[in-house]
Amino acid sequence: MLSIYLGEMDQAIYYPPVYFDNQYEDEWITDKLSMEMIKDVDKSEVIGPHLIESPVLGPISVKEISGGVKTLILMAFDQSGKIFNASACGDNCAKWILKIGEEKDLTINLRHIMDFGNEKFEIKILNTGEIVHDMGQFVEIAGRYV
C-alpha cells in the first residue's frame, strides 16, 4: 500500500536525485519496470546499464535521466528503508508511484498536492491515519498540510 506523509518530514531524503547518483545499482536500470518508467516519463530508451538514448539530448549516462525517474527507481528498488520526497517528481510520475505502491508497501513524503488522476486508488495519509480513494478526498486532507 502507498502511504504518504504530507508536509515537511525531517527524516525524508529531500532531494532524491543526488542520493540516486551515489546509490543506484546497474541492475536497477535494466529492470523491465525501470525501462518502462524511463520510456514513459523521459521518452528515452535504455540501451544498457550505462547508456540511455534521449530524443532531446542524444546518448546520455544514467546520471542524466530526470530527477523524477531517479526518484521512482529509488522507490521501486532501494532497500535501505529511506523515505523519499516525491515532490522531486512531476505529476507524470503519479501513476508510477501508485503502481509501485500496489506492488509493495511504499512510504513517501509529499510537499505539494500531486495529481493522482481520476481513477480510484488507495492511499493512506500518515498525518491522519485516513485512507483516501480519489483526488477529492486526497485534496481535502492534503490542503491542510501542504
Image: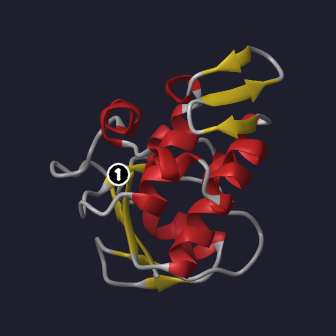
Q: Residue furthest right?
A: 55
The answer to whether 24 appears left or right of 13 in the picture is right
Q: Residue furthest top?
A: 57
Residue 53 appears in the figure: yes
- Along the line of sight, the residue nearer the viewer: 69 or 45: 45
Residue 143 appears in the figure: no
Residue 101's place in the image compared with 17, above or below, is below
Residue 91's place in the image compared with 55, above or below, is below
Q: Position of residue 45 (x, y in %)?
A: 77, 37
Name which residue lies at 31% across and 37% down: 19
Q: How many marks?
A: 1
The answer to whether 136 appears left or right of 24 in the picture is right
Question: Residue beneath label 1, please?
Answer: 84
Name which residue lies at 43% across and 52% down: 74
Residue 93's place in the image compared with 57, above or below, is below
Sort mark 1 into few (<14), some (14-19) or many (20+) by Cα contacts within 10 Å. Answer: many
